Amino acid sequence: MSSSRLRIDPDRFWMTVERSAEIGAGREGGLSRMALTEPDREMRDQFVSWCREAGLEVTVDQVGSIFARRRGQDDSLPPVLVGSHLDTQFNGGRFDGIVGVLAGLEIVRTLNDAGHVTRRPIEIVNWTNEEGGRFPPPMTASGAFADVYSVDWVHARQADDGATLGAELERIGYRGVAEVGGRPVDAYFELHIEQGPELDAAGIDVGIVTHGYKSHGLRVEITGETAHAGPWPMEKRRNALVGAARLCVAVDDIGWRYAATGGKATAARLVAWPNKAGILSDWAEVICDVRHDDPESAAAMAEAVRKALPDAATAAQVEMRIVEEWEWGGAIFDEALVGSLRNAAAALGQRTLDLPSQAGHDAYFLARICPTAMIFTPCRDGITHNNNEFTTRDRQVPGVDVLLQAVLARADRAGP
Ligand SMILES: [Zn+2]
């Protein structure tokens, strides 16, 4: 059969998605499969066994990302990477990240059935800790692969229970030995649910991701002084929790100032110590981020957050300092690769919608080291990071077929 006629097996694909939905069940309908927990281990084991059954060679790198390789006719050529993540948020859904990894598996199974060996190798990848829900920040392992973060830094990321990412990798048996990144990659494709309402509303199954919203994130540490909640005078209070709360409100206000043009600002996390009744907290931490489709507006929003620090600190008589900043997004995707998605969709008779991505994805970091493109697939009402995240087999399959054709075209193309 000519490779342009290849189609995935929808039932087989959906069976893997449904099997994944049994591992780490959260609230009804959802998943709670935080990175490097027992459910994450179980899902990884399941994924690895599927990959081995498909004849793939599995390697795990030092930050726990799993690569499943299908050899190419010329196996010395750099591989085409296809993937996403199998971890979820604490109250996550069954599809976010998952359909992208399992789409890679389905593509390989389809090629196996057809006996089609691509010119270049294909590797399916499951990136560790994409969500960052347990170990902030998100996309830590793909960041390390793209040399944005060091391996030691990734290993030192800490969960609320004090566990480090490195020790947890060891505990679940996924602290691999393969070098992190440092090798040529021909291209990276990621299929992901849209996490917005547009495809669903338009009744279109394939979204072509044109660019990413520009995002800036900050982690801020606040220091004050503990004191008794009763006798200690108001004018002497240095409550770190209050300083953090004032900063959170300021961040939210910035979001509202830019809301009319689509800007978003999120005070995502506030932790305080000792955070107990009867005592003022002397330490707190805030993680926040700002996002905007226009990079200049995003930068202005980030600057507004930095400027909000002194006011919030003065009002609560505490010290604040930014301990970490990160950014991603913008015009990062490869034109030719995005074009190959359009061609594949056209050949399959699929209508497409051009969309920016408002969420962060591993693709953002991969785009720094190789040509990268993303496909979005629908999710009902755009609900995500929520146990009500929902979609159907028939609305995912067209995107996976587009991915198959685009990966084939890329992996089989002539040239070095
Ligand atoms: Zn995701």
Image (tube, rainbow, N blue to C red):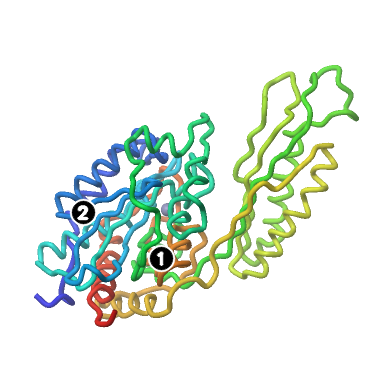
Residue shown at the point (25%, 64%) measured from the top left:
122
Label 2 environment density (alpha carbons within 10 Å; few <14, some 14–19, many ≥20):
some
> In the displayed structure, would residue 374 be above or below residue 382?
below
Viewer-closest of 120 and 266: 120
Viewer-closest of 361 and 413: 413
Q: Which amino acid type is marked by label 2?
A: Glu
Residue shown at the point (45%, 43%) measured from the top left:
89
For discs 1 and 2, the disc positioned in front in the rendered view: 2
Callout 2: SS: strand
Give the image quarter of residue 378: bottom left
- Left or right: 210 with respect to 226? left
For mark 1, what is the residue?
199
- The quarter of the rendered structure image containing the C terminus is bottom left
- Left or right: 216 with respect to 360? right
x and y, in percent, of residue 258 in the image: 68, 62
Residue shown at the point (77%, 51%) measured from the top left:
308
- The quarter of the rendered structure image containing the N terminus is bottom left
Mark pair 1, 2: CA separation? 36 Å
Give the image quarter of residue 294: bottom right
